[in-house]
Image (cartoon, helix red, strand yellow):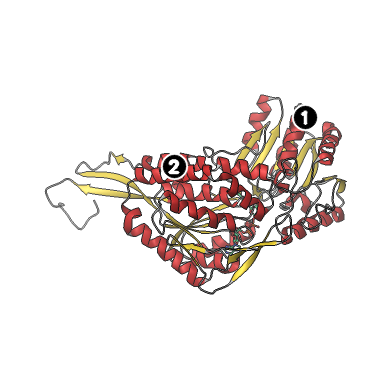
Amino acid sequence: MTQTYQLFIDGQYCDPAGGEWFDTINPYTGETWAQIPRGGADDVDRAVKAAKRALENGPWATMSASARGKLMRRLGDLVAANAEWLAETEVRDNGKLLAEMAGQVRYHPEWWYYFGGLADKIEGSVIPVDKPDLLTYTTQEPVGVVAALTAWNSPLLFIAWKCAPAIAAGCTVVIKPSEYTSASTLEFMELTKQAGFPDGVFNVVTGFGAETGARLVEHPDVAKITFTGSDTTGRAVYQSAAKGLKRVSLELGGKSPNIVFDDADLDAAAAGVVSGIFAATGQTCIAGSRLLVQNSIRDRLVDKLVAMGRTAVIGNPMLPDVNIGPVTTPPQYKKIMDYIDVARAEGARCVLGGQRACGPDLDRGLFVEPTIFVDVTNDMRIAQEEVFGPVLSVIGFDDEADAVRIGNDVIYGLAAGVWTRDIGRAVRMTKALKAGMVWVNTYRAVSYMVPFGGIKSSGLGRESGLQAIDEFLETKSVWISTSDTPPANPFIQR
Ligand code: NAD
């Protein structure tokens, strides 16, 4: 018995205007478990108009920032109270480990608490302007209707990252989740109702990227786009948004180096490398998909990684002792297997995995063995292009300068890891690496307090942390004359 979902527009669940739905599949069982509405141009228009009405009229437009913050904290409490089933919905759709998704959803409320607390601390400034008869100050105003487009790997987390600062700023949102993992976003809307958000503040239009997503991006009443996805789609979104001169932030892909020096704690580094590439079945933007290892310790480290990879349990993501779940989508599975072929053809040597994982418990879903390639050079496609799967490319380096050169020699600049006991080297590396985030002797840590985002082809703007709220604000400068006499000469500029 499959579940049939509805769109969420103007505070109500409703059917799509076109009366069409599409299947959503459980990646572990390979079975359709729900029907997702196929939103069309009319639905997008209704959702954006509802968001615009809520922004300009009605209770949200006049609500105090403190009251906004209270609603956000209430929403955080509701997410905490409902974390278990939300996480299960997420796993049913994206196939990631319940252990990881439950942790993620339990952590999710922190974004509502943090940004809810910031809502009434958004301040302008009084400027001691150089014209004594003028009072001049700035105010910070919501940028407008925000379109939030999310990727399939962590839909609920992305709602928190995008919507918490947007809502704190006083914006209203229309969310377009990935067509592969829309259910949890639709379920989440019920909590926004229970929290008491006015109608139209949150809206969700589900559907396909090139159809529903593209319509949303080009809608004239959308002021700001916050996008998480591939750099290919990100570029298309950026081009479309440029026509309307819309504000854009982009969280895109990566090919992040995890760099291990010969003075590192090798056991800790091995665990960090494994967590960087095999956690979430490698389906994470911050995957440390290039292991840069100093040549003097290369074989020792690779042996440790192979041993750890061999013991990884592949299987049902709902089970607590499973380490690697299925790949989320059939196109993603094909892409991973194609890259494994490319790596072999390029001359890389596979020392672990490299096959579809099969077995009585695995045959319905699409599982890929944790895979390690050695003898990789940084000019190979397997070293340059994002695989978004459990495939590690091992590249040797001689010294620090070599590590920096190879580390930076990709189009991406999302994240990097450095493993060394030498504090001076650690600091030098954090400065030299061209990435939005650098971890030293750890990997894949995130927090609502710490900016997240990349440079180069990994995107524009930052999510989380104090500055995230600026992505959803416009500055207005106000000039008030305190003079009681008219200007001496109205024909010249003051
Ligand atoms: P994707 O680019 O295929 O899709 C992302 C979203 O954009 C989806 O909602 C999709 O429906 C929509 N979309 C697709 N075509 C569109 C179009 N023409 N116009 C408007 N919207 C469109 O990405 P994906 O496969 O869902 O996600 C994987 C990618 O996301 C990887 O590259 C990964 O690195 C990246 N990612 C980045 C971050 C980050 O924070 N930097 C986090 C997670 C994932």
SS assignment at label 1:
helix
Residue 227 in view in this figure? no
Q: Residue at x 52, y 47 (%)?
A: 160
Compared to residue 443, the image places residue 363 above or below, namely below
- Residue position marked by numbered label 2 in the rendering: 73
Q: Amino acid at mark 1?
A: Asp
- Residue position marked by numbered label 1 in the rendering: 267
SS assignment at label 2:
helix
Q: Position of residue 170 (x, y in %)?
A: 39, 50
Q: Residue at x 74, y 32 (%)?
A: 269
Front disc: 2 or 1: 2
Q: Which mark is residue 355?
A: none
Give the residue furthest to the front.
1
Name the foreground residue: 206 vs 77: 77
Q: Position of residue 74 (x, y in %)?
A: 44, 44
Q: Quadrant of residue 54?
A: bottom left
Classify the position of the N terminus by image quarter. Answer: bottom right
Residue 486 in view in this figure? yes
Q: Position of residue 420 (x, y in %)?
A: 72, 28
Name the foreground residue: 282 vs 436: 282
Q: Amino acid at mark 2?
A: Arg
Compared to residue 13, the image places residue 77 above or below, namely above
Q: Residue at x 74, y 38 (%)?
A: 273
